[in-house]
Image (cartoon, grey):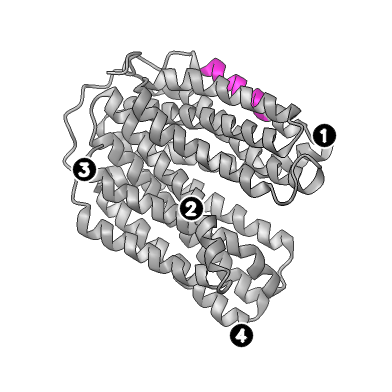
Amino acid sequence: MPRPLTPVLIAVFLMYLVQQQLASVVGPLAVAFGLPTSQLSLLFSVAAVATAVASPLWGLLLDATGPRAVLIAGLVLCVVGPAGFAAVVTFGLDETLPADLAFLLILFFRGVVFGVGIAAVLVAALALAGLTTAGTGDRTRAIGFVGAAQSLGVLAGPVIAGVLVAGSTTLPVYLAPVLAAVAAVVALVLVKPVVPVLQEPVRAQPVELLPAFGAGLLLYLSFAIAEVVVVFLAADRERIGSGAIEGVLLGAGLGLVLAQGLLVPVLRWAPDRLLKVGAPVAAAGYALLVIAPSAAVVTAAVLVVSLGVGLGVTGFAATASLGVGLRRQGLVAGLVTLTSGVTFVVGPMLTGLLFEVEPNAPALVAGAAALLATGLAFVPAGPRVPHSAV
């Protein structure tokens, strides 16, 4: 792993830990503020839209100014957002702020400011992975480590929040800006201006990357559907009891970490092979999810899904990065982040509509998306992305 990437991976891990830590306490805080469920859903939607929209803009700025400036700017926003959120919670709970005004400020700080900031952090990390590696194998492993850091933060956030709320519901809220500030200081001290490594000329045309982007979009969409449908199954069906939902979601996060942080570096497969194997593995997991009779089988199904998605989206991101030159690593990182962000805006809404029609419909649609991604994975992505794991 390139040395310049290490402090950035720490920043990615901490920011996604903060994101999930705050997400874990938003529900209880909404109850304390007397906010309806519709407003709570709006908060998550606004955050997802902010991240998606900001990602390509950060990518363009990165190509113009370099990854360090974008990373620091993003981390500053990641400090300001949670700090503002903590202040609003403090003054809202003691009724200094009216509930409606408090919600608007929460929407701004937690949704917009933090969403824009975390987009910059992920874009900078993916771009650095592209700028500091040359060979296909090194690039793929570096991008896998970025995904693993992100997934590990998502996995750890709710666990830490659960421990902290035993003392007070607001403890995770006050810890969040502290963790973001630590990440900002680490990046400010350790991340230096990057000298890109020498790379081969890129001969692929942008249109040749469209199948990989299509496969990535479908895999991310399928996973967004799967995460929501598990919650629906726990609420409306007997297959998952209320006490087993945490184990199922843990399986989803663990599968991503294992795929991106362990299997990708150990297997040393080329990006196209990761896509060709990961997408059908995910499809098999969705098929198992449809027929799963118990929480244990649902957990196994979700673990298989997340292993497949983890392999596949790493192959997608590596293919995109290898398909452009040094001057466009920021833009392609922004487009990769946009691809995942859009699906987590559309996925929950689509899942709700499908679940009303038939409880198994979301899993079937997710499986169909993974099968379509499998087909796209076999479309060549251009001559720049070789089929060997050199």
Q: Residue at x 38, y 25 (%)?
A: 319
- Upstream in sequence: badge 4 or badge 1: 4
Evaluate if marks 2 and 3 touch, with contact meaning CB atoms under 8 Å apart: no
Evaluate if marks 2 and 1 touch, with contact meaning CB atoms under 8 Å apart: no
Image coords of residue 355 (percent x, y): 78, 39
Classify 10 Å Cα crowding around label 4: few (below 14), some (14-19), many (20 and above): few
Q: Amino acid at mark 2?
A: Ala
Q: Which of the labelled discs sits on residue 94, or is there none?
A: 4
The residue that mark 3 highlights is 3
Helix, strand or loop at mark 1 = loop
The residue that mark 2 highlights is 156
- Upstream in sequence: badge 2 or badge 3: 3
Q: Nearer the viewer, mark 2 or mark 4?
A: 2
Mostly what secondary structure, the magenta segment?
A: helix
Classify 10 Å Cα crowding around label 3: few (below 14), some (14-19), many (20 and above): few
The answer to whether residue 306 is magenta is: no
